[in-house]
């Protein structure tokens, strides 16, 4: 694959990262240039509110933005890019998060900028510094290429002062954008600028008078009723959210930022404000939000979501990326039940990748995921796994809630060469996840039923066929034997589906299951015959 062929294919690809990257290509048809006319990187940004720890929403936004970044690089033949992970750590703390150590400490500092509140964990300079460190550790864990930028650093150092001057100079125009969007009561107290009280250190939501944009001087009424005149520079004020977002776009020169559907109005108003400041609204994607298994919006307060730690307990990192890649403009359910399918679909798509023509590769989610955190990464190493995740789940389900990794690998020895986690690291991750899923979700629900007389007769025939096949039978031969028994009209199955359903319910205790030939080869012919004997014993007449 040549660079030219990749660029040509990328320009007509319907994959959403390329469609998003096309927006940037239209924005900069000749590449982005600086004041001197030289090339400068296109700037991608993601935002993070450090009032809590990073979560799956943080991951998906950085991942999806990275996918667009890599697509743009492929589309342009390697044009320079940057990704900034921005922390809004000048925000005033509005609520004490749940499950935080020393909540009294946070309660005593409500309203203050997050970067000026002591760390309740006692490890960092402030609460924001703690959460920012967690963010960087979180992003580093997944190998993201990014630059960390702190709002507090930019406000305190004066880096945002020129942009703040612009806000004060265009104060009336910004008020003209915002006031029509507010309720009458809110209009009376609204101000784009939030001064920090010199007496309490709290971020104030009070009206201000702009005295001098050049020096940043404003006048306001402090919490104690006194009139205060102070500069907005040097971290003595911050901006309201929508104005702050626009100012950041302007000050940093952001070209692309995506956000959730709940921020649609913010995108509109911030887009107008950045134009007032003399800048340009970034390109971006508004993605749909996550739903729980009942189709309800996920809420932190309800606790009805799925954490990234939970996903990585019951699935794999690749499966998470795969699930998040698919159609970001459609709402996605986020619960443990969707993980097994995502694991298997990832490996299905990865296994198909190498043999696909280029245009199909560019539409394959795995093509994008392999390049997310390593430009030029491609097919190589573990491009397939010898056992599906669903088959592993059936195996551990039969082994019971106390199944161990050692047991699973011993059965895998029936199916693959050199059955060790060191030799098959990706399969090892799947084994770990399968054991956790079985322990917490599958084993408590499995219940094998007794076969009907007709099913019992068919099981006896299957037992005889397995005895004849012997230990060394292939999965394909075993599948054919199962298939032929199900087709035999003597057993009375209306369809093969009824036969397989009977096998799943009587042998595995589940209404659905794997390709039986593969399962028998994995579990072992003698062990499967024991399952049949146990099933037949369930409807044996009592003595």
Image: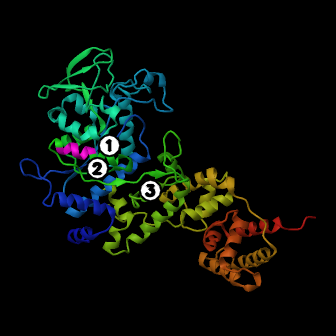
Badge 3: residue crowd in 10 Å (few <14, some 14–19, many ≥20):
some
Which colouring convention does the figure follow?
rainbow
Element at label 2: loop
Q: Mark 3–mark 1 contact, CB under 8 Å?
A: no
| Residue at the (25%, 27%) spot, across then down | 237
Nearer to us: label 3 or label 1: 3
In the picture, measured across the screen, residue 42 lies left or right of residue 323, that is left
Write down the region rendered in magenta: 269-275
In the picture, measured across the screen, residue 79 lies left or right of residue 182, that is left
Q: Which mark is residue 47?
A: 1
Q: Which mark is residue 331?
A: 3
First in sequence: mark 3 vs mark 1: 1
Quarter that holds the N terminus: bottom left
Quarter that holds the C terminus: bottom right
The residue pinned by badge 2 equals 257
* Up/down of 269 relative to 522, above or below: above
Nearer to us: label 3 or label 2: 3
| Residue at the (27%, 55%) spot, across then down | 69
In terms of depth relative to the viewer, which is nearer, 205 or 473? 205
Q: Which mark is residue 255?
A: none
Q: Quadrant of residue 219?
A: top left
The residues tagged by marks 3 and 2 sit, at their Cα atoms, a distance apart of: 19 Å
The residues tagged by marks 2 and 1 sit, at their Cα atoms, a distance apart of: 9 Å
């Amino acid at each position: 694959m040549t660079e030219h062929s990749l660029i040509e294919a990328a320009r007509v690809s319907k994959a959403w990262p390329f469609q998003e990257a096309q927006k940037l290509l239209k924005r900069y048809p000749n590449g982005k240039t600086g004041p001197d006319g030289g090339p400068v990187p296109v700037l991608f940004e993601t935002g993070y509110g450090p009032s809590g720890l990073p979560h799956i929403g943080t991951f998906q936004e950085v991942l999806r933005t990275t996918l667009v970044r890599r697509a743009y690089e492929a589309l342009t033949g390697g044009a320079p890019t940057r990704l900034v992970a921005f922390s809004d750590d000048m925000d005033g703390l509005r609520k004490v998060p749940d499950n935080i150590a020393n909540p009294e400490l946070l309660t005593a500092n409500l309203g203050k900028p997050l970067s000026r509140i002591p760390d309740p964990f006692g490890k960092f300079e402030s609460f924001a510094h703690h959460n920012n460190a967690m963010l960087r550790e979180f992003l580093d864990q997944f190998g993201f290429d990014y630059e960390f930028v702190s709002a507090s650093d930019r406000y305190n150092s004066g880096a945002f002062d020129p942009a703040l001057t612009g806000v004060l100079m265009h104060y009336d125009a910004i008020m003209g954008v915002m006031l029509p969007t507010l309720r009458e009561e809110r209009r009376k107290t609204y101000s784009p600028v939030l001064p920090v009280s010199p007496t309490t250190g709290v971020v104030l939501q009070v009206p201000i008078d702009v005295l001098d944009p050049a020096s940043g001087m404003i006048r306001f009424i402090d919490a104690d009723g006194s009139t205060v005149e102070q500069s907005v520079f040097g971290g003595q004020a911050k901006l309201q959210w929508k104005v702050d977002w626009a100012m950041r776009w302007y000050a940093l020169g952001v070209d692309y930022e995506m956000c959730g559907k709940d921020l649609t109005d913010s995108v509109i108003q911030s887009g107008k404000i950045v134009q007032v400041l003399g800048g340009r609204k970034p390109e971006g994607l508004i993605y749909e939000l996550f739903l729980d298994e009942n189709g309800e919006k996920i809420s932190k307060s309800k606790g009805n979501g799925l954490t990234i730690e939970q996903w990585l307990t019951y699935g794999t990192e690749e499966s998470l990326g795969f699930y998040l890649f698919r159609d970001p403009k459609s709402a996605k359910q986020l619960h443990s039940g969707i993980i097994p399918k995502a694991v298997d679909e990832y490996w299905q798509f990865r296994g198909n990748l190498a043999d696909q023509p280029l245009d199909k590769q560019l539409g394959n989610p795995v093509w994008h995921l392999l390049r997310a955190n390593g430009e030029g990464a491609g097919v190589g190493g573990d491009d397939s796994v010898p056992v599906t995740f669903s088959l592993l789940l059936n195996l551990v389900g039969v082994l019971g809630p106390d199944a161990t990794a050692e047991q699973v690998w011993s059965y895998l020895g029936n199916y693959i060469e050199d059955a060790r986690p060191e030799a098959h690291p990706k399969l090892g991750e799947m084994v770990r996840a399968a054991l956790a899923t079985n322990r917490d979700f599958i084993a408590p629900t499995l219940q094998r039923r007794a076969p009907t007389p007709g099913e019992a007769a068919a099981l006896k025939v299957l037992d005889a066929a397995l005895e004849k096949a012997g230990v060394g039978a292939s999965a394909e031969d075993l599948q054919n034997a199962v298939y032929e028994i199900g087709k035999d009209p003597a057993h009375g199955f209306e369809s093969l589906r009824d036969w397989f359903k009977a096998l799943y319910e009587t042998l595995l205790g589940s209404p659905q299951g794997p390709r039986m030939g593969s399962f028998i080869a994995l579990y072992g012919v003698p062990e499967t015959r024991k399952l049949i004997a146990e099933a037949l014993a369930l409807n044996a007449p009592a003595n």
